[in-house]
Every structure is written in structure tokens, then in C-alpha cells.
């Protein structure tokens, strides 16, 4: 309840002196354990922004890409499809290109290449998330550590003075609350980016797996001499006129 009351008072205090000045003042009053929390926030946000930008660049219109690859296979063969993959960014195109490079070795070789390169692309997508997860765990830990140190300082002040006075313990308790608040806020911010990145990766992986299945099916149809794309529907014939 004390923590919730402190958070509810922040907007009112920020209106008096400004949000930035309020945060700087609280940071200075929080003690030495505020610095590790700040470093975690800066490094964590750097990793999070890099992951968000990379994942958004890797996310392409998979359905349109598959259609383009099928058309290239029908019109120009494997070499044309490889060129389409080379000109398209993202893990789906990389997996397709790896599979097309093994077409001459048979469908089994294509499947193995797709699975192997799919695992590699997945590791690239998940790069940096382990550090982001670590920082999400460390931020509140440093906050709680500052809480413990603040409470120890408060009891040391009581022991040194031989008396319990609010002015003696206020400093230690304030450090305890501030480090806890900032540690939890940092963890919440980084958790939001982590969940966004994980959901984005899951969707890209699903699209990559579905597209890989379509690639294998398309190569099987091509080897069998069957069309890869559905022919356009014939226009309906005009109704014949009635008998006189």
C-alpha cells in the first residue's frame, strides 16, 4: 500500500517541478543502487530497440512472396526463383534460397536444408533476448537489494541514536522505497519489449514453417510437371437467347 500511494503521488509532484526534475531528484535520493538499475535500463532498451527494428525488417508479406516464387518457378525455373529469394529480405527468403540451392540433390536434400537453415534463422531472430530476460530479472533484484540496504541503514541509525524517531529512519526507508520502485519500473518496461519480440518471433517462425511446406509441395509439383498456381477461372459465358 505504501508503494501504491507513492506511485499515485508522482503525477501531482511532477506537475509542480516537472517529470525530468522529479526523476532526477528521486534518482539522487535513491542511493548507490540506483546506478545499476539505470545501467540495466539503458543497455536493456538498446537491445530491445535493436531487436524491434531487426524483427520489423525481417517481417515481410509472406503470402505475396510465396506467390512470386511460384510464378518464378513456372516461368524461369529454379534460377529465377533463387533470384526472387536473393532480392527479398527476411528469414523466409533465406530458407527458401537454401532449399532451392539443393534442388538438384533431390527433395530430401531440400527438406534437410530447409530444416537446418530454419534453425539458424531462428537463432538469429532470438539473438539478444537472453540478455533482455536477464535484465528483467536483475532490475527488481537490485531494487530489492537497495531496499534491504536502506532498511539496514535505518536500523543502524536507530541503534546509534538509541531512540526511534521518524527523522532517523526516514532516509533509509526512502532509499528502500525508491530503489524498489525504480527496479520494478525498469523490469516492467523491458518486459513489454521482451513480450513484443517473442510474439513477433513466434509469428515469423510459424510463417517460415508454413512457407517451407509450400516450397516442398511446389517443387514436388514442378518435378511432376503439374502447374504450381491455379489457372485463372474462365469467364462465364453469356446466356443464350430464348427460342422465338
Image (cartoon, rainbow, N blue to C red):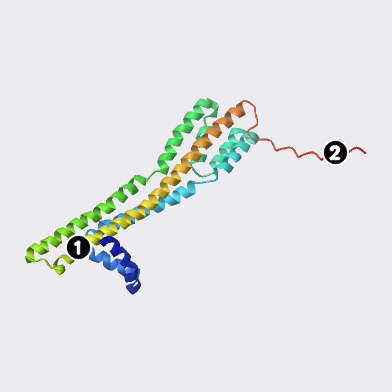
Instruction: Determine which residue is flagged by label 2.
Output: 240
Q: Which mark is residue 50?
A: none
Q: Tell me what residue is drawn at x 32 percent, y 65 percent.
A: 8
Residue 149 seen anywhere in this rendered image of the structure: yes
Whole-percent x, y for residue 94 in the image = 50, 39
- Vertical arrangement, residue 201 with respect to residue 15, above or below: above
Instruction: Determine which residue is flagged by label 1.
Output: 173
Whole-percent x, y for residue 32 in the image = 21, 60
- Vertical arrangement, residue 32 with respect to residue 242, above or below: below
Query: Crowding at label 1, few (<14), some or many (≥20) Cα neighbours within 10 Å?
Result: many
**Label 2 vs 1, first from the N-terminus:** 1
Q: Tell me what residue is drawn at x 29 percent, y 49 percent.
A: 137
Whole-percent x, y for residue 69 in the image = 59, 38
In which image quadrant can residue 222 be found? Answer: top right
Q: Which residue lies furthest to the bottom in this view?
A: 16
Q: Tell me what residue is drawn at x 55 percent, y 40 percent.
A: 85
Per the model, the C-alpha gap separating discs 2 and 1 is 92 Å
Q: Given contact means CB atoms under 8 Å apart, are the residues at marks 2 and 1 in contact?
A: no
Amino acid at each position: 500500500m505504501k508503494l501504491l500511494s507513492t506511485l499515485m503521488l508522482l503525477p501531482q509532484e511532477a506537475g509542480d517541478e516537472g517529470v525530468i526534475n522529479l526523476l532526477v531528484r528521486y534518482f539522487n535520493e535513491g542511493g548507490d543502487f540506483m546506478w545499476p538499475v539505470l545501467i540495466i535500463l539503458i543497455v536493456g532498451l538498446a537491445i530491445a530497440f535493436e531487436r524491434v527494428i531487426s524483427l520489423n525488417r525481417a517481417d515481410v508479406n509472406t503470402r505475396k512472396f510465396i506467390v512470386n516464387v511460384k510464378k518464378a518457378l513456372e516461368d524461369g525455373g529454379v534460377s529465377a526463383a533463387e533470384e526472387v529469394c536473393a532480392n527479398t529480405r527476411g528469414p523466409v527468403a533465406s530458407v527458401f534460397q537454401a532449399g532451392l540451392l539443393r534442388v538438384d540433390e533431390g527433395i530430401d536434400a531440400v527438406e534437410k536444408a530447409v530444416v537446418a537453415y530454419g534453425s539458424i534463422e531462428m537463432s538469429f531472430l532470438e539473438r539478444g533476448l537472453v540478455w533482455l530476460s536477464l535484465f528483467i530479472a536483475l532490475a527488481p533484484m537490485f531494487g530489492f537489494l537497495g531496499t534491504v540496504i536502506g532498511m539496514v541503514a535505518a536500523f543502524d541509525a536507530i541503534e546509534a541514536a538509541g531512540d526511534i524517531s521518524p527523522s532517523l529512519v526516514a532516509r533509509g526507508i526512502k532509499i528502500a522505497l525508491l530503489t524498489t520502485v525504480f527496479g520494478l519500473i525498469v523490469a516492467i518496461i523491458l518486459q513489454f519489449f521482451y513480450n513484443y519480440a517473442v510474439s513477433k518471433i513466434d509469428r515469423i517462425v510459424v510463417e517460415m514453417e508454413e512457407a517451407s511446406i509450400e516450397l516442398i509441395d511446389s517443387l514436388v509439383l514442378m518435378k511432376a510437371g503439374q502447374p504450381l498456381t491455379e489457372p485463372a477461372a474462365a469467364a462465364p459465358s453469356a446466356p443464350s437467347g430464348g427460342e422465338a
